[in-house]
Amino acid sequence: MNMQQFILQENVLTDNVLLIADDGYLFKGGYKAVIKEYVFSSSWSDREVIKRFRNEETLHKYLSKNYPEFDQESIEIY
């Protein structure tokens, strides 16, 4: 599967990442975009939280609320 990958936030151990399916593709379950966020768990590991989006409008609302410094103009969702 082809996808675009953007770093939303750089953390100490892992980075929060936005994955967007390319034109004509969807992630399993019919999702257009997936955000993998990592929350501090201990000094050696982070806990992964996955957010999935089927609607572009919902994704833009989430990004503007939680990642206001991220340039949303650079992403294209098909």
Image: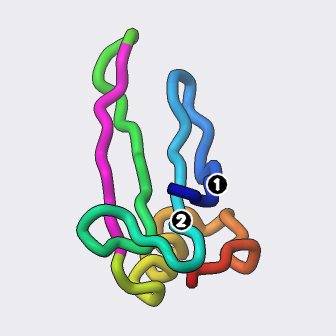
Q: Main secondary structure of the magenta part?
A: strand
Q: Position of residue 29 (x, y in %)?
A: 24, 68
39 or 76, which is in the foreground? 76
Q: Write the residue at 35% across / 26% down.
A: 46
| Mark 2 neighbour class, 10 Å CA radius: few under 14, some 14 to 19, many 20 or more | many
Q: Which residue is mark 1?
A: 6
Asked if the residues shown at circle 2 and circle 1 are in contact, with their CB atoms under 8 angstroms apart, the answer is yes
Say which of marks 2 and 1 sits in front: 2
Q: Amino acid at mark 1?
A: Phe
Q: Position of residue 5 (x, y in %)?
A: 62, 53
Q: CA distance from mark 2 to mark 1?
A: 8 Å
Q: Is residue 19 above or below residue 10?
A: below
What are the residue bounds of the magenta stretch? 45-53
Q: Write the residue at 29% across / 24% down.
A: 41
Q: Is residue 73 left or right of residue 53?
A: right
| Mark 1 neighbour class, 10 Å CA radius: few under 14, some 14 to 19, many 20 or more | some
Secondary structure under tag 2 reads strand
Q: Is residue 74 above or below residue 48?
A: below
Q: Is residue 56 left or right of residue 77?
A: left
Magenta stretch: residue 46 in it?
yes
**Number of numbered discs present?**
2
Q: Quadrant of residue 6?
A: bottom right
Q: Position of residue 44 (x, y in %)?
A: 38, 10
Q: Earlier in the sequence, mark 2 or mark 1?
A: 1
Q: Which residue is mark 2?
A: 20
Q: Amino acid at mark 2?
A: Ile
